[in-house]
Image (cartoon, rainbow, N blue to C red):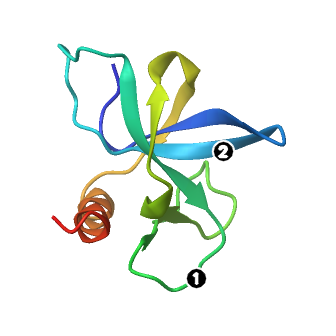
Amino acid sequence: MTKPGEVYRVDLGIGGKVRMMVVVSREDSDSPRALSLCVPITTAYRGSDYEVELPSRPFLRTKSYANVQGLQAIQDHELSGPIGTFYGSALDDLKRALRFAMDL
């Protein structure tokens, strides 16, 4: 079971690239499916409201951003980690960007 803010490595099968992704789905021990909603972490910043600047963490080598336009459902068995966690205002900013992206 994953928790919001946890960061995992995920092999997306795109040219063999493994990407860090942050879980944004709620913690649910009784979920009907073993899926987590995840947002990719990137170093490419385009200055949009769909991107959230992330605080520095030991597992991030450079300045990084969460791109909520890349929201994906990932099967829990495909998640490797967790390798770190975001919490507090970083997680609040991610939730705000998701509400913007989905017009909620």
In x, y percent, where is residue 87?
A: 30, 51
Q: Which residue is mark 2?
A: 19
Q: Are marks 2 and 1 in contact (CB under 8 Å)?
A: no
Q: Is residue 13 above or below residue 49?
A: above
Rounded to the nearest angstrom, the CA distance separating label 2 from label 1 is 18 Å
Residue 9 visible in rendering: yes
Q: Secondary structure at mark 1?
A: loop
Disc number for residue 5: none
Q: Residue at x 58, y 66 (%)?
A: 64
In x, y percent, where is residue 74?
A: 48, 31
Q: Which residue is mark 1?
A: 46
Q: Secondary structure at mark 2?
A: strand
Q: How many residues crowd around disc 1 within 10 Å: few (fewer than 14), some, or many (20 or more)?
A: few
In x, y percent, where is residue 78?
A: 57, 22
The answer to which of 54 and 102 lies nearer the viewer is: 102
Which three-letter amino acid code belongs to the residue tagged 1?
A: Arg
Q: Residue at x 55, y 27 (%)?
A: 81
| Quadrant including the C terminus | bottom left
Q: Is residue 10 left or right of residue 95?
A: right
Q: Is residue 56 left or right of residue 29?
A: right
Q: Is residue 41 above or below residue 79?
A: below
The answer to which of 30 and 9 lies nearer the viewer is: 30
